[in-house]
């Protein structure tokens, strides 16, 4: 496992109620673990088609939000009833990311090294409040019950480190087996991990 940068976990499960053409999110239950911390965000993602400007191909991208889990719901409601807060956003690679916004695109670096298990999707998440963008490397997988899930790693971009090297580090971490749970009873993965 690489120790160059702190990493976190990402997982999102398919919304079993999603139907073609409806407005429901494609992934309605997920978690984004902020790199190197215990901070967990809930993830909701929609899927859209777009035309790749370089190739002209129609591809799929995922966008949505990853919001902090509320420690105090009453304080959150009081904040919502208060005055408007200025929009918190950052610009990155020609795109504007609002606070809590996440975007995933097909990984353009996957094809240049087919012998390496690079992520299927790559993107970024802006946690808000001026915090740095979080990079995501995500694989499209299935649960043990045959449902689609997105699973991957989070990390902070390292200045001067090529994107392909960071993705290879994420792939090495993603390939490591999960630590065995000790104790009695059967551990459950909630939605079929």
Image (cartoon, rainbow, N blue to C red):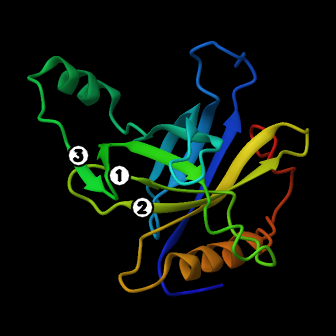
Q: Quadrant of residue 88?
A: top left
Mark 2 or mark 1, earlier in chain: 1
Front position in the image: 23 or 11: 23
164 w.r.t. 93: above or below: below
Q: Percent from the top left, x then y, of residue 65?
A: 44, 38
Q: Percent from the top left, x then y, of residue 11?
A: 64, 49
Q: What's the CA distance linking mark 2 and mark 1?
A: 6 Å
Which residue is outermost to the top? 22
Front position in the image: 129 or 111: 111
Q: What is the tally of numbered marks visible in this picture?
A: 3
Mark 1 or mark 3, earlier in chain: 3
In the rendered structure, the answer to whether residue 31 lies left or right of residue 70 reads right
40 w.r.t. 137: above or below: above
Mark 2 or mark 3, earlier in chain: 3
Helix, strand, or loop for circle 2? strand
Give the residue at mark 3: 89
Q: What's the CA distance linking mark 1 and mark 3?
A: 8 Å
Give the residue at mark 1: 126
Q: Residues within 10 Å of mark 1 (few under 14, many from 20)?
A: many
Mark carried by residue 134? 2
Q: Quadrant of the N terminus?
A: bottom right
Which residue is outermost to the right? 145
Q: What's the CA distance linking mark 2 and mark 3?
A: 14 Å
- Is mark 1 in CB contact (under 8 Å) with mark 3? yes
- Is mark 2 in CB contact (under 8 Å) with mark 1? yes
């Amino acid at each position: 496992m690489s120790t160059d940068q702190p990493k976190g976990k990402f997982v999102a499960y398919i919304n079993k109620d999603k139907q073609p053409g409806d407005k429901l999110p494609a992934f309605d239950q997920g978690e984004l673990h902020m790199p190197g911390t215990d901070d967990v965000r809930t993830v909701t993602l929609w899927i859209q088609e777009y035309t790749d400007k370089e190739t002209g191909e129609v591809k799929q991208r995922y966008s949505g939000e990853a919001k902090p889990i509320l420690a105090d719901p009453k304080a959150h409601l009081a904040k919502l009833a208060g005055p408007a807060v200025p929009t918190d956003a950052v610009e990155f690679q020609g795109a504007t990311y609002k606070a809590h916004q996440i975007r995933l695109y097909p990984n353009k670096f996957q094809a240049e090294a087919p012998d390496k298990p690079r992520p299927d999707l790559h993107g970024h998440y802006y946690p808000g409040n001026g915090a740095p963008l979080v990079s995501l490397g995500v694989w499209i997988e299935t649960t043990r019950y045959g449902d689609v899930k997105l699973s991957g790693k989070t990390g902070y971009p390292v200045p001067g480190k090529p994107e392909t090297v960071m993705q290879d580090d994420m792939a090495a971490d993603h390939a490591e087996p999960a630590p065995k749970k000790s104790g009695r009873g059967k551990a459950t993965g909630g939605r079929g991990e």
